[in-house]
Amino acid sequence: MSLQFPILDTLLHPPYGALRRELIAGVFSGSGSLTRNTGALPPFNNVNAYGLRTSFFTVPAKFGFKLGNPLEYEQRMVQLTARYTDALGNDDDLEVLDLHIERVWIWVEPGPTLIHYEITPGVVCVFEWMIVKFP
């Protein structure tokens, strides 16, 4: 017999239809880290979001791609890493995602400490947090 906690599960992993995008100001290239500290309680005290949407603002003309919807680039455009901190303060990268397409990434484990990005030289990205939609 297993215990079920539907309210807790919905809080930690809301359905996609309950989410909306929140633009992170600016455009991004190179490498760096993203956080969204809104003063929320753990596990949402560092990245108070459920996912990240990545769009490509600039792509060099020489980059090859496969036609389709979405457009799929032959090389990795950006690598995203979700870093988490355990109860003793140790950091681990629990999820790593290589993007060849524009897409939404909803992380499996809620409450990362930060989202690290490594963008291929010449590529410029736009990021949007995926957060809960309020009326």
Image: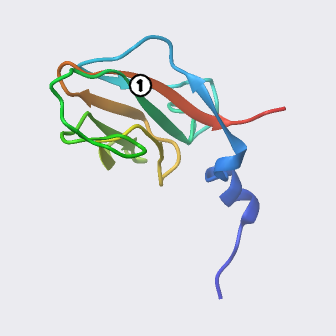
| Image position of 47 (left or right of 117) | right
Is residue 48 something that shows in the picture?
Answer: no
Residue at the location (51% across, 42% down)? 111
Q: Quadrant of residue 44?
A: top right
Q: Residue 130, how many percent across, how many down?
A: 58, 36
Residue bearing mark 1 = 34
Residue extending farthest front? 67
Residue at the location (47% across, 48% down)? 107
Residue at the location (62% across, 51% down)? 12
Above/below status of 98 relative to 129:
below
Of the pair 25 and 116, the residue shown nearer to us: 25
Where's the N terminus, which quadrant?
bottom right
| Image position of 127 (left or right of 78) | right
How many marks are shown on the rendered structure? 1
Q: Residue 53, how many percent across, how many down?
A: 48, 35
Badge 1 amino acid: Leu
Residue at the location (40% across, 37% down)? 102
Q: Secondary structure at mark 1?
A: strand
